[in-house]
Image (cartoon, helix red, strand yellow):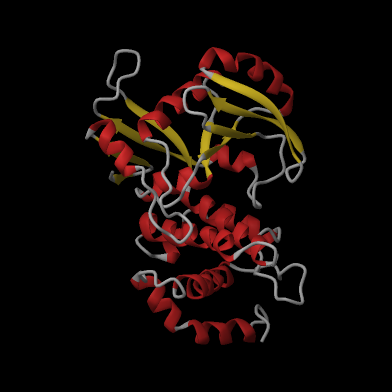
Amino acid sequence: MTIEAQGVSHIADLSRGDAAQNQQSKVADNGDNKNKVNIPLSDFADMYIRVEKLFEGLPVVIIGGRAINLLCSVEYRHSPDIDVVVGIHTGWLAHYKEKADKYGFEASDTYNREKGAQSIKLIDKKTGVKFDIYHTGMKPISGIPNIDVLKNFEKITLYIDGFKLSGKNPNVECNVIAPSLLGIMKFNTWVELSGNDKNDESKRNKHAFDLINIIRHQFGGDIDQFLDGKKELLRGYICRGVIRKPATPREVQGDAIRSVEEFKLEIVKTYIRVGKENKLRQPNEIVAFAKSELQLDQTLCKKGMLRK
């Protein structure tokens, strides 16, 4: 599978048929992924089209592990469930739950306590794959408001040779959260889990791996390009204290990050803490920046932006 950048569109070439698709769905071994297999992308494309039809053309945006795999062109993440943000509010849930059967899904009511809202879960009758539905009536996902996800996504074109839908050989397009927003979301999730000793290391660090892989595959290892991707949104999140540092053992919550430069430093620290421990290949930009880490650290201390 290859995904080539074309502006804000990408192409996934799955031209070797279902056997190859199943082979390509084997997940890269990042520690806890051994022998795990994702659903073939032909099945994913079929389900995504039916979900879009169910929601009558409203924005449906892939987030989470499946978004990582699509944006990075590698099955990095085992993703048995698919997380999507849909442009609906709580009041419309019952309407779409009633229609689910027509499009090959079973729908069940759920209550997301963390997000403080009712929602629905879709289960594909053919494969058993679950779609977790996030909507605009929910609290932000790892600090990112759902409305920002719906306004900032990229289109991935899945070119599938030999996969026919309704008698055609289609170029299937799906919406995927903007890489910069997904990276911020992953950093925030890693920070949240790092402050809880009950979460094992592999569950925490997979989100750091996701951030590193986004920077590597979408931005050529260039952290500045990653930070520039959604600069105005990033600055807004920083002003509102949405992005924080990992908590120390004595803290309940880490300090808020107060500038883009400070966020850049924390990304490098994340890479050093997680990436080096797991012998990941180091993109040149990250290596070069890591060498100047102490100097930048001292500069931020002088400006009162970082505690000694």
**Left or right of residue 247, residue 55 in this image:** left
- Between 212 and 195, the one lying in front of the other is 195
- Furthest-front residue in this view: 35
Q: Is residue 58 above or below residue 193?
A: above
Question: Measured from the top left, where is residue 302 in percent x and y?
Answer: 63, 86
What quarter of the picture does the C terminus occupy? bottom right
- Between 35 and 47, the one lying in front of the other is 35
What quarter of the picture does the N terminus occupy? top left
**Residue 11 appears in view:** no
Which residue corresponds to the image point at 51% horizontal and 38% vertical from the top-left?
A: 62
Image quadrant assignment for residue 165: top left
Image quadrant assignment for residue 146: top right
Which residue corresponds to the image point at 47% horizontal and 54% vertical from the top-left?
A: 229
- Between 242 and 197, the one lying in front of the other is 197
Which residue corresponds to the image point at 42% horizontal and 41% vertical from the top-left?
A: 38
**Left or right of residue 264, residue 219 in this image:** left
Q: Is residue 123 above or below residue 195?
A: above
Question: Measured from the top left, where is residue 4 in percent x and y?
Answer: 29, 45
- Furthest-left residue in this view: 16
Question: Measured from the top left, where is residue 222 in percent x and y?
Answer: 39, 65
Image quadrant assignment for residue 147: top right
Q: Is residue 252 above or below residue 174?
A: below
Number of residue marks: 0
Question: Measured from the top left, where is residue 281 in percent x and y?
Answer: 35, 69
Which residue corresponds to the image point at 38% horizontal and 51% vertical from the top-left?
A: 72
- Between 102 and 253, the one lying in front of the other is 102
**Residue 168 appears in view:** yes
